[in-house]
Image: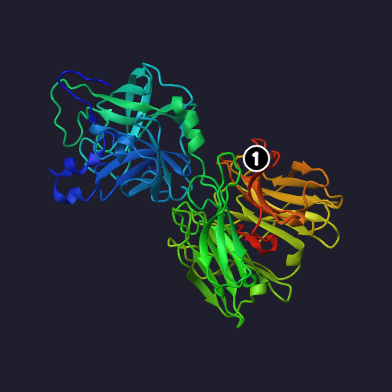
Amino acid sequence: MIRPPKHSLRVLTASVAAAIAAPLTVFALPAQAVVGSPGADNTYAFTAKLVIGEHERGCSAALVSKEWLLSAASCFVDDPAAGISVPAGSPKSKTIATVGGGSSAVRQTREVVELRQYGQRDLVLARLAQPVIGVEPVTVSATAAAAGQELTSVGYGRTAEDWAPVKPHSGTFAVDAVNNGEVTISGKDDASICMGDAGGPTLRLVGGKPELVAVSSRSYQVGCFGVESAEGTPNTAVATRVDDVRAWIADNAKQTPAQDYNGDGRSDVATWYDYADGSDKVHLWDGGMHGAMQLPTVAYSADAGTWNEDDAKLVTGDYNGDGRSDIGLFYGYSDGTVKLFTKNAKADGTFEGSVVSWTDTDWTWARMHPYTGDFNGDGRDDIAVWYDYADGSDKVFTFLSKEDGTFNKPFTAWSRASGWTFDHMKVSTGDFNADGRDDLGLMYFYDTGEVKTITLPSLETGAFQHDQVEGWTSGSWGSAERTSVQSGDFNGDGRDELAAWYDYSDGSDAVISFSSTAANGALTARKEIWRADAGRYTRDHMRVVGGDYNGDGRDDLAALYGYDDGSLKMITWAANADGTLNEPLHGAEKATGWNYDRVSVFTR
């Protein structure tokens, strides 16, 4: 830390105390950017503006993955001079991040729902409630800044003339020194780091692209609006290094996994148990550190007569976009009425009360086949219902989710007059073309014995492309009855794969993945990712589901297995970096008290 005798470095969070002297018309806004040039609309679009509390503080940040910002820990404490230790978890005050630079076309607002500080360094990762779409995250540099290099700092803090600029500003700085976890820099051409710039990115241009080397921490704020600097005050600032904690950032700034009901960064398995007395319970099997499932906890209970499990089609997804998966069910009544009930997840791993999101009397419950995915790319999961009409036609209806976890009325998202039979297909959802929206992926089993993988890419509206995208084809795959499918990003490359579990007639089993590298999501690449010899597993004793159960950023497979002695066990197949699956890891077991036939598993 620089400590000259007559001057002291100031923290850079824009605070209420600093705003008291300002006119009230300005006080309603957070003080916000680097004294320098305003960026073009999409220049440094990964730079975010943070508003903490009721405009108590303003800061800046950098988008380092679709769901995570990197900022200064000092932004999230009341008095940085007293210490910058930030508790892990939700921010103390509601924090809103705006990402996308000055362009309204890409600007997006997200709430910060989780903080993770690196040790006692002025550095914190902030998880957003929903992913940011259409903005490329900045690359974190693998090498430190060096004395004499020129860097660019960006932020939403004050400028020399403006208390609250609407666009991020940038300035050029020279590196004076690199010491331990900090970089000391000096402004060039009157550039200065100002209040509100804390957490903003400090960048180095490599091959024409910016790389993040540090985030702004403290400054003398020379030339900043409202700051009186004594003559001779150096135009110096301190930024917190990020290159030396690049691995920590990569390990933590991962996409929130599907079916994470308690928000701990690992997928869980939710099961519905239909008790013999007519009561029902939803249990959560929590994913452990290495992926082994923990003993289940009760997340919801219903008295006898509330539900008939045979009349429920279960669905699950993060319908309100808070980072925790919710549950729902389409319930068919004896009078022909169908209702969609949803239950939002709470932070303690239980669920709120049921909310009716939709009611209809013209749909036939038995012809509805629901699937979950974020089909319009807004960061909240939606529901697509494949409706198999009696006349042989098919339609997909999309229920777009609302911010409260309920749903809009369904609309026709795809249709086909004839040619397909639902019983001939196995369907799953995933982002197969890496455009930020989930698609429909399926294996279709023709009467000729031919099998094809088919993708129906989603559109920005939540509808699906009418023309099917065909991928891998085989004339010798086998039967639909021996095939079950899941989807997931098993190799962590940002694209989901379609995984088919095949139960061979000789008692052996294999999991085959189908992946795409094409913009249209064609699932052309076939790869065997796991195999078991005959006798190890009986497929009709398993309820298989996908998710990231060890929190490593790659999806795995899990199964509730029912043994002949009546016991039940959760088994996990963790994924490797090449997309193959490890040998199974046995987790929690229910030796007595449960009947396999009374358990249903929530899947997407």
Q: Quadrant of the N terminus?
A: top left
**Total of numbered circles in the picture?**
1
Looking at the image, can residue 520 be seen?
no
Looking at the image, can residue 438 be seen?
yes
Q: In this figure, which residue is indicated by the disc labeled 1?
A: 575
Give 599 or 5, whichever is nearer the viewer. 599
Q: Is residue 380 above or below residue 35?
A: below
State left or right for residue 504 relative to residue 358. Answer: right
Counting from the top left corner in percent of width and height, residue 479 is at 82, 57
State left or right for residue 503 relative to residue 239. Answer: right
Instruction: Name the residue at the front extreme.
Output: 592
Counting from the top left corner in percent of width and height, residue 76 is at 31, 40
* Secondary structure found at label 1: loop
Q: What residue lies at 21% left-to-right and 35% top-to-bottom?
A: 160
Give 450 or 240, whichever is nearer the viewer. 240
State left or right for residue 100 relative to residue 432. Answer: left
Q: Residues within 10 Å of mark 1 (few under 14, many from 20)?
A: many
Name the image quarter holding residue 282.
Answer: bottom right
Counting from the top left corner in percent of width and height, residue 497 is at 66, 47
Instruction: Name the residue at the bottom extreme.
Output: 335
Name the image quarter holding residue 337.
Answer: bottom right
The amino acid type found where label 1 is placed reads Ala
Q: What residue lies at 64% left-to-right and 59% top-to-bottom?
A: 593
